[in-house]
Image (cartoon, grey):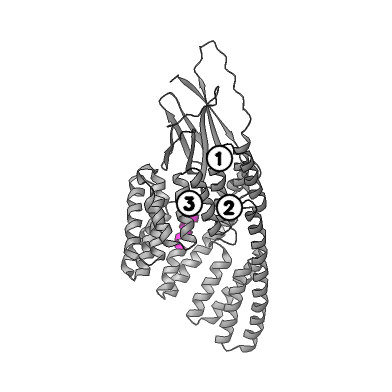
Amino acid sequence: MKLFLKYIWLIGIVFSTTTFFAQENDIGTIQPRFTVRGSVIESDTRDPIPHVNIEVNGGGYTTTDMFGDFRIEAKKGDEITIRHKDFETVYYTIQSNERIIVEVQPNKPANYKSKFSKSRIPIFKSLIDSADTYLKKDAKKSIQFIADALLESNSVKENSEAYEVLGDIYMYWKQYDLAVSNYRISIQNRETNDANLKLANAYKLNKNYQESIQTYKDINKTDLSNWQLVSLYEGLGDVYLLTKSYDLSVSAYKEGLQVAQKHLITPKITDLNSKIAQTYNEKGEINEAKGYFKNSLKLANTENKKRAVEEKLKVADFRNNLNDYSNEIILRKEALDDISDIENDSVFDNESALTPQKQNYKIGNAYALQNDFPNAITYLEKSIAEADKKEDVIVQKDATRKLSDVYRDAGDYKKALSIYQDYVSLVDKAYIKKEQEISQAVPDLVKIL
């Protein structure tokens, strides 16, 4: 093979993706992971370069396939290393889920003046990137980009990628049966580890538990990156937990934990300690659960404030299950303070567990279970007010129903009835809102099937 010099350029994700990640990452407390797509090609012939080593510091490892393409999990600020025996190693700091194109130029004589220019972005890849950008924001636009990409597709590989992203869209909009269908189509065109892992997860969420288990088991573990292998064991543990196969669940989680610890995949070490704790809790082995929750909380505190709060809330749920409402309330109040700090720089959507309205509701509920009605009323009213401000109809509805129950239990039946009537109105409002969300997502998704 000829010797190469390297050039790297990026297909930035236009529209609002970069802004979104900046909002969540600039303060250094929230670092979501995402999939980075990329290609390594020869600049003069456009031929792909296979078997290039791709590594994220402290994270995943993969290689380019026969088409020169790769995908790897990363977060903002990670350094990605692109290494091959025939060209100089490339280092690049990840900023968002941009598509990375590494153009490798033939080595030229010293007096040769090379010119570097950005060639036209392939239309198919640009459309796929745009679909990714709008996936969580506008289902209609995202689906239209996939439809356009399929029209531009020139290979089974591109068909596979398009249907995989379509499956991702269905997954986000919780249409799990349709996600399964599209991941299967993707795999029929071209089988990849990523698509198989996604299919297994989609089966799980669609409650096809045996199909999910079998899909996980059929994946060749020797072909997986370290991150993918941990994800496989974690997913398998999740399915076993859902089917109440607690021993198998713990065994799978511990296999994943061993890989994560060996390769220093810190976020997964925390997650798996937490999941082992939750499994022991459901199994009724409380002391084992306490030990692993202690580990997970300690580990989470070494990551970032968001992850620490998430784990604190899981431990609060654990305390609730033990009827230890006093310690549950303490943990949730601490979490509320942390959430307030994080919200100074970030905004959580209403689906997140990290919203003031959800935590005020749960604190109010815990006080109600202690028959501390004045405090219960205070926190439930805070929840209702916050939910109304955030247009979180679901929490507003639930907190209103709970507030009515508290007034009833406190003996104020007139107030309880009045608030219950508010609850009935909110039920209708929640139903209408859900119908609108479904009508927005589903028809547009069905068009390309």
- What residue do we see at 63% from left, 67% from top? 387
Q: Residue 399 at what x, y percent from top left? A: 59, 74
Q: How much space separates mark 2 and mark 3, taking CA atoms?
A: 12 Å
Residue 307 forms part of the magenta stretch: yes
Can residue 245 be seen here? The reply is yes
Residue 330 x, y percent position in the rendering: 46, 69
Q: Which residues are magenta?
A: 306-312
Residue 402's image quarter?
bottom right
| Residue 49 placement (x, y as % from top left) | 47, 29
Question: At label 3, which amino acid type do we have?
Answer: Lys
**Quick check: marks 2 and 3 in contact, CB under 8 Å?**
no
Residue, disc 3? 198
Say which residue appears at 58% left-offset and 74% top-offset. Answer: 398
Amino acid, disc 2 = Ile
Residue 416, picture quadrant: bottom right
Viewer-closest of 321 and 312: 321
Count residues near mark 3 (Cα–Cα under 10 Å), then give few for <14, some for 14-19, many for 20+: many
Quickly name the residue at label 2. 169
Q: What residue does disc 1 label?
A: 158
- Who comes first in sequence, dot 2 or dot 3? 2
How far apart marks 2 and 1 lie (CA) works out to: 17 Å
Relative depth, front residue between 74 and 133:
133
Q: What secondary structure is found at the residue carrying circle 1?
A: helix
| Helix, strand or loop at mark 2 | helix
- Which percent across, then down, holds residue 425? 68, 76
Q: Are marks 3 and 1 in contact (CB under 8 Å)?
A: no
